[in-house]
Structures are given as structure tokens and as C-alpha cells.
Amino acid sequence: MVILRQQGKHTGGKPPWGYKVVGPRSNRAKGVKGNRRLDPDWEERALMLEIVRLRDLEGIPCWETIAVRMRQMQRDARRAGIDNPALFRREWSWESCQRVYAVFWTVLVKREGTSWIADPTIKNLAEVRLAKR
């Protein structure tokens, strides 16, 4: 299992925040060997960046307020007919927003660095936090 994770392969269950499972599944009946692996989910990462922006740059201290903003984004996207699977995949509660924020800093930025972050202000903030460690 550890070796599979180190190779970036999916070991089962729900993918972690910021990732999606891609590749064919194994099917013994058809003789197909699967190659499921974890790839970055850029749409979900954009939502993670939005939560970090609300918390750190806009200075919203209350997780419930951030969750309300995320649910408002869901409603606005539905009304506009925008099809963003990452936005509608999860129910945005204050706990999920808090979890996303923690995963952003402890997993994504720490493991992958800041090269994937498009927003320059969040990228600078991440680089400063990494330099302090």
C-alpha cells in the first residue's frame, strides 16, 4: 500500500482533497489491467484557493461565514448554468471549509510546493509560510 501511494496510485476509497482518480479500472472478466492513479483536480484546487483567499486575505475569521459564501457560490453557479463538478461534489459546511484550509497548508503546499498556485497573492503568502518553517 505504501509503495502504491508513493507511486501516486489510488489505493481505494474517496480521493483526498485536491485530487481525482483517473485511469481505467481493473476487470478480470475482460482481462483488463487497471491503472488507477491520483491526478490533481484543478477545479477543486481553485475552490481551495478561494477558501484560503477568504480566510487569509479577506480576513474572515468565522468558518460559518466562509461556508455561507461557498454555498452562495454554489447557488449562483446553478442559476448561471455553470457545470463545475468540484463545486457541487461536496456540501460546504464550516467543518469542510476548515478541513480544506488545513489540507491546503499541510498537504498540498508542503508536499507540492507553490509552483501550481496561479494567484500571485496566495502564492506569495504560501512562499512566506514555507520559508518560516
Image (cartoon, helix red, strand yellow):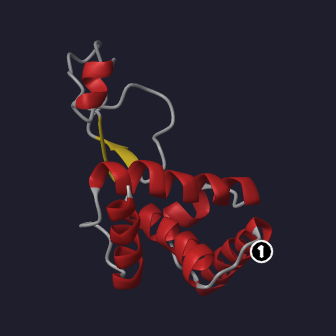
| Label 1 sits on residue | 65
Measured as percent of width and height from the top left, residue 19 is found at 39, 49
Marker count (numbered): 1
Q: Secondary structure at mark 1?
A: helix
Q: Hey, what amino acid is under mark 1?
A: Thr
Q: Note whether 83 is above or below 92 in the view shown.
A: below
On the image, the x and y values in percent for residue 121 come to 40, 83
Taking depth in this image into account, of 111 and 47 the one nearest to the observer is 111
Badge 1, how many Cα within 10 Å: few under 14, some, many 20+?
A: some
Question: What residue is at 34 percent from the left and 31 percent from the top?
Answer: 10
Give the residue displayed 50% in from the left and 62% down from the top. Answer: 85
Which of the 4 image quarters holds residue 130? bottom left
The image shows residue 45 at horizontal and vertical percentages of 43, 63
Q: Nearer the viewer, residue 21 or 79?
A: 21
Q: Name the residue located 31 percent from the left edge and 77 percent from the top edge.
A: 118
State whether residue 67 is above or below residue 34: below
Quadrant assignment, res 23: top left
| Residue positioned 57% across, 81% down in the render | 81
On-image quarter of the C terminus: bottom left
Q: Quadrant of the N terminus?
A: top left
